[in-house]
Image (cartoon, rainbow, N blue to C red):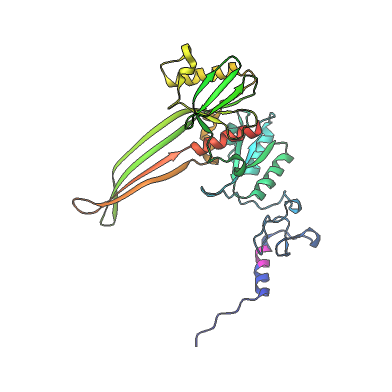
Amino acid sequence: MADEPALTTANDHDQDAMLVMADDTRFSKDEMVACSECNRKNPPNRLACLYCGAGLDIAEIRSDIAKITFQRPEPWEDGFTIAYVGSQDLSIETIESAAKILQLELETFAQLLSPRMPVPIIYLKSLAEAQVLASQLSEIGFGCAVVGDDLLTPRRPPTRLRSLEFSDKGAVFLDFNTNLRFEFSYGDKLLLIAGSICKTRSETTVKRSKRKLKVTDSAESISDEMVVDIYPPSDVFGFRVRSSGFDFSCLEDQMQPLTAENMRVLLETLRSSFPSSVLVNVYRTVKPQLEEIWPIDHENQSSNVSRGTFGGVRVERVIVADNTTQFTRFSRLQRHLL
């Protein structure tokens, strides 16, 4: 007769939990943190309940010994960004200590901070972990803030503009799709974020025969479009000028034959027309480091399977890499921290 499986009891579960806690430093009863969901006691270095998985009260967690997993959200999930606020100079000792806390490579981290503007330094799935790390960074004098994707709404791009109209008193922004008009006075303080939208399209054809795969054809195309995001006061979503499809006739006699030059002139015109405007032009500088924090989107646009003329199976696949969400997230971060 086969042995029957042993029954699992509540006491067995508690014993398993104690085994998991065996690696933890021993804490006094007064230091243990009660879970608000199941009311069981947890070590003060845990961010989630050992028994039910619910988040523990951050105020009762010891941030100096908290266990951080550094887990990032999946592409379809919202996450939490810890951002350097860019408001003070940092000593090399502070930068080294911050890199150690965040477990980041020092040289890359220092390059990311070099513009002295608000930039993301780490992207996490857990709000609790982000808050604990931000607390540790603040203790060493590293100014930072935790910003959630629910605030940045990176998948909702700014309103695209068709053109601008300049008058004696202000400027009118024309919506690309609806031709709605938005009027702003030259006394308004605009925030201008310069950057680019880059899309890479990769097409690959693979032949599969006799359990072997062979790439028979591949091609890659890249488009790099200059953009400027504009945030008037009290506007959290903003407007976007894309170099393609924009009517630069508003520049009149300053209009240039090249699109890149027209974008440069447009920026200069906006800055001179709105004297209190602020320009952020560091996206291209920090973009290589941003790839490690906010990965760009990759979309499998099409996949086709067919039989080859001389046998075997042909698989054709098109993948598009797009940094639109990344740039929008960066743009909105400036909007909220500057």
Q: Is residue 49 left or right of residue 162?
A: right
Q: Is residue 93 visible?
A: yes
Q: Residue at x 29, y 54 (%)?
A: 212
Image quadrant holding the C terminus, namely: top right
Q: Quadrant of residue 113?
A: top right
Q: Is residue 302 left or right of residue 52?
A: left
Q: Residue furthest top?
A: 253
Q: Residue furthest right?
A: 30
Q: Look at the picture and state if 13 lies above or below 201.
A: below
Viewer-side residue, 97 vs 318: 318
Q: Is residue 4 left or right of residue 87?
A: left
Q: Residue furthest bottom?
A: 1
Q: Is residue 107 visible?
A: no
Q: What stretch of residues is rendered in magenta?
A: 17-21
Q: Residue at x 42, y 44 (%)?
A: 299
Horizontal and vertical percent position of residue 328: 54, 36
Q: Look at the picture and state if 232 lies above or below 269.
A: below
Q: Look at the picture and state if 21 lies above or below 272.
A: below
Horizontal and vertical percent position of residue 87: 69, 30
The prevailing secondary structure element of the residues shown in magenta is: helix
Horizontal and vertical percent position of residue 281: 56, 25
